[in-house]
Image (tube, rainbow, N blue to C red):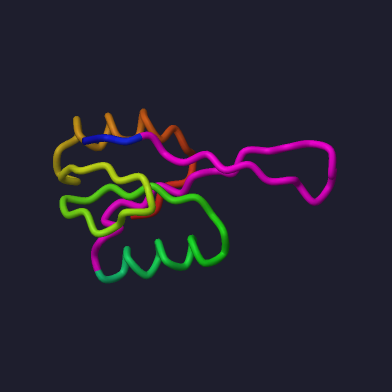
Amino acid sequence: VLTPPLQLSRLPRSSPTMVATKEVYFVIGGCGFLGRHIVEAFLNRGDSVAVFDIIQKYDDVPFYSGDISDETQVSQALKKVSTPYMVQ
């Protein structure tokens, strides 16, 4: 099941009256050994994260199930996340 990414709001440092949307980091393979540490690092610094992997290990971040070798699955997940920040 594909779920939409979380969009969190924050006040930018330059202007206390403007509200900006945080970017979402899309981590491919976010449930593996390295990916899990990358996801945790992003979350610890307050960033929004979406994970693409074949095994779900997170309950608190948007998860997209799929295989990296399936171009259609990756493309569909990327369209739903719509972020310029991708980590593989």
Which residue is the extreme one toward the front? 59
Residue 20 lies left or right of residue 68; in this view the side is right
Magenta span contains residue 54: no
Tell me the quarter of the image containing the N terminus: top left
Query: In the image, what residue occupies the spot 26% across and 71% down?
Result: 33
Rendered position, 54 above or below 46: above
Q: What residue is at 28 percent from the left and 31 percent from the top? A: 75
Locate the C terminus and report the quarter of the image it occupies: bottom left
Principal secondary structure, stretch drawn in magenta: loop
Q: Position of residue 66 (x, y in %)?
A: 18, 42
Residue 54 in percent (x, y) is at 16, 50
Q: What is the x, y in percent for residue 31?
A: 26, 61
Residue stretch in magenta: 4-32
Query: Is 22 in the magenta?
Result: yes
Image coordinates of residue 69 in percent, x first then y, are: 15, 44
Q: Which residue is drawn at 40% across and 35% down?
A: 81
Q: Nearer the viewer, residue 33 or 69?
A: 33
Does 41 appear above or below 10? below
Q: Nearer the viewer, residue 2 or 59?
A: 59
Specify whether 39 is left or right of 65.
right
- Report the residue at 20% width, 34% height from top: 73
Query: How many circles with numbers are drawn on the protein?
Result: 0
Left/right placement of residue 44 relative to residue 56 reads: right
Q: Quadrant of residue 21?
A: top right
Q: In which quarter of the image is residue 36?
A: bottom left
Q: In this view, does 18 lie above or below 25?
A: above
Quarter where residue 5 is shown: top left
User: Is 5 left, or right, of 10 in this rendering?
Assistant: left
